[in-house]
Amino acid sequence: MEQVAAPRKIIHVDMDMFYAAVELRDRPGLRGKPLVVGGRPDSRSVATTASYEARKFGIHSGMSCAQARRLCPQCLFIPPDFKKYRHVSEQIHAIFREYTDLVESVSLDEAYLDVTRNKKNEPSATRLAREIKARIFAATGLTASAGVAANMFVAKIASDARKPDGLCVVRPEQVMAFIRPLPVLKIPGIGRVTDAQLAKLGIRTVADLEKCSLDFLQEQFGKSGRYFFDIARGIDERPVIPWHERQSYGAEETFASDIAKQGPLLDFLRDCAGRVFMELQEEGKLARTVTLKIKYADFQLVTRRQTFADFLFSSEDVFRAACALLERTEAGRRPVRLAGIALSNFLPARQRVELAAAPLFKKSDA
């Protein structure tokens, strides 16, 4: 008789309004006031995080700071301090690794933990989640919300169910009752465009999606159809992967006023190329692909990309590549609101070591 594998035990931890919470911890006099971590409200910056007091006014991350100020004139704006946030994130992730090595970091403030087998030999994932939350608060003074379930999809949804400082446990027999009422937009991988497609088909909730056959979903959505079919039944077999190598390094900026001429834009791209290449150097990586991102004043977004046979060995290489890509846009003829550069297509780690150890580590030898 075939044995049925026991359900996995996955914890999804999501820090509560992380950047804002760090700032409020360090500036207790601001507690209870609406706060946005972002740029100045008279700039084109966007909110990275809003405190719960600010959210009551309809302010959310990704909203322009100017719009946030219109919604809440008394809102306070604090520039982000990513060095500080990374330090706090390292403290939090160190706590995670005391419980399991299977930690998949999604961002500075969010991670999945597979605690099916864990370093504490604790059979209850619920007790572990409660203990992890308490450890985070003791170490950082910050609250986290956690979801506990048998897979990553349900755990993530659960962590959002009782924010802030919540703990939501969804047992295997409770999964369908928990996910059926959810709007399909809650499903990871479904954005506004796919949501609009689903709406045209009359599919608004997970329960609606569950009624669709596999053939129908594959006909409508191709390879994604299988994913939608499984998720609607609470099936998510993705493993928690403890480490992801970044696939790209980039920097971009929304300008205080539109740039109409190429000269100032080239000055920005030279600086941007230097910043991105330096970040890549710090990771000991080399890249072959340069992507240029341009957003015009009318918000039309275009990207131009080139992959080289040789690796890029200097910020000047990156800058020259970006200049060539810029010629394939309408910058200089149309005002530009945002620009950025990203590097990707890295030399594999083992080859990087071999190349660095070569007697003549020159561009001409690559």
Image: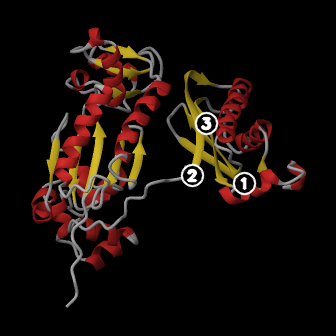
CA separation, marks 3 and 1?
A: 26 Å
Residue shown at 15% from the left, 47% from the top: 168
- Which mark, by number, is residue 91? none
Which residue is at a point 25% across and 22% down the rendered structure image? 54
Q: Which of marks 2 and 3 is nearer the N terminus?
A: 2
**Real-space Cα distance between discs 2 and 3?**
16 Å
- Looking at the figure, which quarter contains the C terminus? bottom right
Q: Residues within 10 Å of mark 1 (few under 14, many from 20)?
A: some
- 268 or 318: which is nearer to us? 318
Q: Which of pointers 3 and 1 lies earlier in the amino acid sequence? A: 3
What numbered label is drawn on residue 352?
1
Q: Nearer the viewer, mark 2 or mark 3?
A: 2
Whether residue 314 is visible here, answered yes or no, is yes
Task: Give the residue at the far bottom of this rendering.
Answer: 1
Q: Determine whether 141 is above or below 282 in the image.
A: above
Q: Can residue 310 be seen at all in this image of the molecule?
A: no
Residue at (26% x, 30% y) in the render: 137
Position of the N terminus, as image quadrant, is bottom left
Q: Where is residue 2 in the image (x, y as percent from the top left)?
A: 22, 87
Distance between mark 1 and mark 2 Cα atoms: 16 Å
Which residue position holds label 2? 247
Amino acid type at image mark 3? Gly
The chosen color scheme is secondary structure
Residue at 19% from the left image edge and 57% from the top image edge = 204
Q: For mark 3, what is the residue?
A: 340
Report which quarter residue 230 is drawn in: bottom left
